[in-house]
Amino acid sequence: MIKVKICGITNLADAMLAIDAGADALGFIFVDGTPRFVTPAQAGPIIRALPPLVTAVGVFWGHPGGHVKSVAESCGLGALQFHGDEAPEDLVGYTLPVIKTLKIADASDLERMGAYTVAAFLLDSRERWSEGEVRRPIQWTLARAASARGRIILSAGLTPDNVAEAIAVARPYGVDVNSGVEAAPGRKDPVKLRDFIAAAKQA
């Protein structure tokens, strides 16, 4: 069954809402200056309250390895997602599973996959992070082509209305959503969240 990651978690209520709706993983963004930024002090208590078998994923962007490891240990993260321009050699030496974000515009962007040894690739658009609006999807056919090269998590522009079609076309390992299930940046909409996860799991 498809795996669902709900990203941009900033509070315990949204975390529990996502879990109750069937989320497999929650994303915590440790990137200062972004709309859904959380500090380790804010994220740690939320993560420690999560039930077993739910993965807390820390999102990082250009952070030194020592900082990433310190945050992972202090918060109890279960996986690491790197969203910047990290080179393949920057992502070695971690004991937790690593997800590398690739920002996709066309097929040439998939050529970079072969250089990385990671647990999964998250395919995102090249647009800046959302300030609340839903972003445009990437080409789902590109995501399907990428699945031959590694485990794919599909992101960018997914909503309750299009996630089932996206899964049917792209056939990813998992899907990732942030602004597509929000009421406001950093605050999830309960109806959108439940509808998204139900649509994804039934696809």
Image: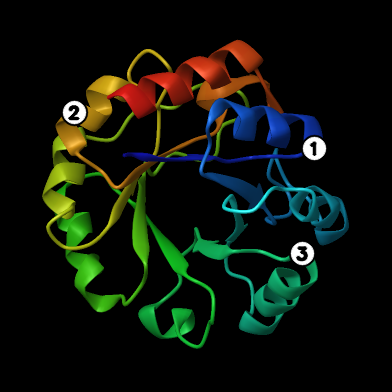
Instruction: Check the image and report above or below for 185 versus 94.
Output: above
Q: Quadrant of residue 16?
A: top right
Circle 1 SS class: helix
Question: What residue lies at 17% left-to-right and 53% top-to-bottom?
Answer: 146
Give the residue at mark 1.
Answer: 12
Query: Residue at image x 30%, y 75%?
Result: 116
Question: Does the image show residue 105?
Answer: yes
Horizontally, is 37 left or right of 21 in the view?
A: right
Dot 1: within a 10 Å radius of its alpha carbon, few (fewer than 14), some, or many (20 or more) residues? some
* Precedes in sequence: disc 2 or disc 3: 3
Compute the Cα span from label 1 to label 3.
Answer: 14 Å
**Disc 2 versus disc 3: distance between alpha carbons?**
35 Å
> Taking 75 as reference, is 107 above or below it?
above
Mark 2 — residue?
Answer: 168
Residue 47 at x, y percent in the picture: 74, 53
Tag 1: amino acid: Leu
Q: Position of residue 147 (x, y in %)?
A: 18, 53
Q: Is residue 125 above or below residue 167?
A: below
Q: Which residue is mark 3?
A: 75
Quarter of the N terminus within the rendering? top left
Kind of residue sitting beneath label 3: Cys
